[in-house]
Image (cartoon, coloured by chain):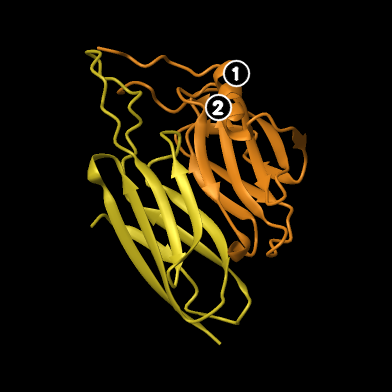
Chain colours: A orange, B yellow
Amino acid sequence: MLVPSAAATPATMQAAIASVIRGAKVNPGKIKLDIPPLVENGNTVPCSITVDSPMTEVDYVKAIHVFTEKNPQPNVVSIQLGPRAGRASVSTRIRLADTQTVVAIAELSDGSLWSHRVDVLITLGACLEDS
Amino acid sequence: MPRAMINVPAKAKRGEVIPIKTLISHVMESGFRHSSTGQVFPRDIITGFVATYNGEEVFRATLFPAIAANPFFTFHTVAVESGTIEFEWTGDNGFSGIEQAKILVE
């Protein structure tokens, strides 16, 4: 039986990011990832993402991706938006297995990519075992 | 049908950006947990969520095991016309859930 490896590594996160950005340059800014810096329970961590964009027909956010460094799998969520969204502001609840860096990347309609990294300290990680 | 909670304003002004909140009950078993005997609990998650406004897609999310149990999303859309906003979740083991909300745009 194949037991999945316990953690993604920064390298697997880089690979997951590379598959999304396809060689393009990622700039810091425009996107804000809002996660509490200190989290007690990694099983449900509130996570909101806001992108600074007018969300018009010609200038809008196409996609938002969230990645983690040390979860078993680097991908967290991929979101597709369009001008119909009106506002590029999304929130959800995520799992974090360990103290780590979370990265959000926004892809705009002009093809540019923007990112924000946040370091999160986890007291109790999302469980990987039955307990 | 799994239990879902939808929050869409009943009324909105034309062109107004409205917030939408959705939550669906689901264990989101990650596939990375195992029992004390080493047996892996097989993955059982919701993988897709789409919101359509009178048939036109306004929001789509691809979910991974790192989304917490009972997936919750808040997002926005422009109230363009009266009608129906439909929410559809799909997932492992043939999981499927559909909910609708009516909106009156003046």
Regarding mark 2 in the picture, which secondary structure is present there? helix
- Along the horizontal axis of the image, is B11 left or right of A82? left
Residue that label 1 marks: A10
Give the alpha-carbon distance from disc 1 to disc 2, as whole Å: 10 Å
Could you tell me residue A4's position as x and y percent?
Answer: 37, 16
Report the residue at 52% width, 27% height from top. A74
Q: Nearer the viewer, residue A128 or B1?
A: B1
Residue ID for mark 2 = A16
* Nearer the camera: disc 1 or disc 2: 2
Q: Residues within 10 Å of mark 1 (few under 14, many from 20)?
A: some
Query: Is the residue under label 2 in contact with that under label 1 (CB below 8 Å)?
Result: no
A53 to the left or right of A36: right
Q: Mark 1 lies on which chain?
A: A
Residue under the image location 50 percent in, 35 percent down: A76
Judge whether residue A111 can be spotted in this image: yes
Tell me if I can see residue A69 in this picture. Answer: no
Q: Which amino acid does label 1 sit on?
A: Pro
- Kind of element beneath mark 1: helix
Residue B75: x and y, percent?
55, 58
Question: Image check: B6 left or right of A99?
Answer: left
